[in-house]
Image (cartoon, rainbow, N blue to C red):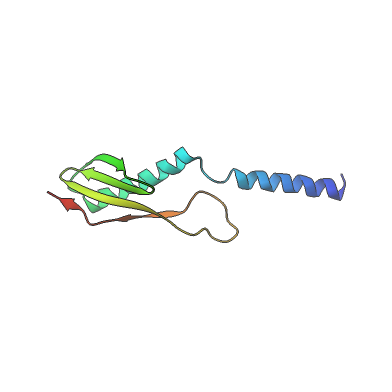
């Protein structure tokens, strides 16, 4: 096999791997919702989570018993040279309880 053919094969192999590294949108959303549920469950341990309402891009209202918590998904910068699923953290507003 020639050097040129090896180089083309390597380029095809590595570019295919990078394009498949990000999660599909439904799996990315599942990761984000799991993180939101965990954060709210820790913030309001007295009440179980009853409902999550999407209120716009990366903003959710979470109803837990008598409390409402606004959760935001905040994207984190990717590390240089690394590909993969979106890195994020969950930020919660102070719970409002009746």
* x, y percent for residue 81: 60, 59
Q: Is residue 61 left or right of residue 82?
A: left
Residue at position x 21%, y 50% from top?
44
Between residues 71 and 34, which one lies in front from this camera angle? Answer: 71
Q: Is residue 44 left or right of residue 31?
A: left
Instruction: State the residue lying farthest toward the bottom.
Output: 80
User: Which residue is at a point 46% across and 54% down the rendered structure image?
Assistant: 87
Q: Residue 25 vs residue 98: left or right? A: right
Which residue: 29% across, 41% down? 53
Q: Count numbered badges in the picture.
A: 0
The N terminus: image quadrant: top right
Q: Residue furthest front?
A: 56
Q: Position of residue 42 (x, y in %)?
A: 26, 52
Task: Locate residue 7, reporting x and y percent.
Answer: 79, 50
Residue extending furthest toward the right: 2
The percent position of residue 72, horizontal first and vertical second, equals 34, 52
């Amino acid at each position: 096999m020639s050097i040129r053919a090896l180089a083309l094969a390597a380029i095809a192999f590595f570019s295919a791997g990078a394009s498949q590294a990000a999660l599909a949108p439904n799996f990315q959303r599942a990761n984000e919702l799991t993180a939101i549920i965990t954060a709210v469950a820790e913030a309001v341990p007295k009440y179980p989570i009853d409902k999550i309402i999407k209120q716009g891009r990366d903003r959710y209202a979470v109803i837990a018993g008598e409390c409402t918590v606004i959760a935001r998904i905040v994207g984190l910068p990717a590390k240089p040279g690394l590909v993969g699923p979106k890195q994020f953290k969950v930020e919660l507003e102070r719970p409002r309880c009746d």
